[in-house]
Amino acid sequence: MDKIQHKFVQVNGLKIHAAEIGDESSPAVLFLHGFPEIWYSWRHQMIAVAEAGFRAIAPDYRGYGLSDPPPEPEKASYKDIVADLLSLLDALAIQKAFLISKDFGARVAYLFALIHPDRVSGVITMGIPYLPITPITFTDHLPEGFYVARWQKPGRAEADFGRFDNKTVVRNVYILFSRSEIPIAHENQEIMDIVDSSTPLPPWFSEEDLANYGSLYENSGFQTALKVPYRSLSETYNITNEKVEVPALFIMGEKDYVFKFPSMEDYIKSDQMKAFVPNVETVFVPEGSHFVQEQFPQQVNHLILNFLKKNI
């Protein structure tokens, strides 16, 4: 961890924080986090790819971690993040990069690959497959207490989270998202209340890890993080050719709660993704949760390195 360097890059009027390790002349690998993650969620993978001869870069998106918030967080969008990543690559003089992403970072990665295909060497996603670039509507088929539906309502999550310090919020989300069931609250219950305060952290996530997350969210809070992804699922894009031609790998933990989303298991296991990403390979990690890269870093690193070396 001590070998990972940190820098702030001026991007579209904001200072974007990026963690980095590896030789600047090596092939670049850009790591894109999910929620409630930040650059730190890729700590195991960054060191592994750097030791294998790649340049690993993991930014905090605008409004996350140590990066500046946008001037109007309530207007933040996926398009903003894609534009930031392009400017970040330009600022670091990187012509092409592999994109490795997790959770909603998968949508960021695939949007970037569709809009800027000449800048992408390959895409790896975890936890969420390629989903058609249309407004996401699976919330319509789940109960009112579904966590996404709750967090989409302005003020609801803010009031829920606001009862706790940032470290406790991250702790609760990690516990919820590491389970194999979709987080759904009862009618008169908030999402944070699903987790009992005595519930231990997952064994692969330490108190030190939690403290790191807590301190990073002290800087950013959750305002932008609630807007992107949860309040931006209806965002539209001017994309006419929805086909990602670069090599791709999808890593999915078989205990990931996302499998329980309506029609998701059939979509993934019947390879419907190939209609949009023809060169994608899907690999399942038998005991893997939604945080598969933190839970089983050696296994995930092996899959990543094989993909990178094959497609360099």
Image: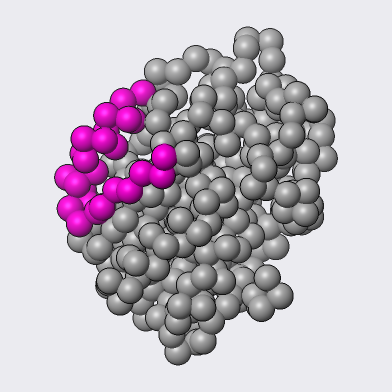
Residue 238 included in the magenta stretch of the image: no
* Quadrant location of the N terminus in the rendered image: bottom right
**Residue sitting at x 57%, y 63%:** 44
Query: Residue 54: which quarter of the image?
Result: bottom left
- Relative side of 45 to 176, left or right: left
- Relative side of 292 to 265, left or right: right
x and y percentages locating residue 170 in the rendered image: 70, 42
The span shown in magenta is: 262-286
Q: Nearer the viewer, residue 285 or 227?
A: 285
What is the image's colouring? Answer: one colour
Residue 267 is at least partly visible in this image: yes
Query: Measured along the vertical axis of the image, is residue 181 above or below residue 293?
Result: above
x and y percentages locating residue 43 in the rendered image: 60, 63
**Residue sitting at x 53%, y 56%:** 297
Residue most toward the top?
187
x and y percentages locating residue 68 in the rendered image: 67, 62
Residue 232 is at least partly visible in this image: no
Query: Measured along the vertical axis of the image, is residue 146 above or below residue 103?
Result: above
Query: Measured along the vertical axis of the image, is residue 78 above or below residue 25?
Result: above
x and y percentages locating residue 107 in the rendered image: 40, 49
**Residue sitting at x 75%, y 24%:** 196
Residue 269 included in the magenta stretch of the image: yes
* Quadrant location of the C terminus in the rendered image: bottom left
Residue most toward the bottom?
25
Query: Measured along the vertical axis of the image, is residue 133 above or below residue 30?
Result: above
- Relative side of 258 to 133, left or right: right
**Residue sitting at x 63%, y 10%:** 187
How many marks do you count on the picture?
0
- Relative side of 248 to 52, left or right: left
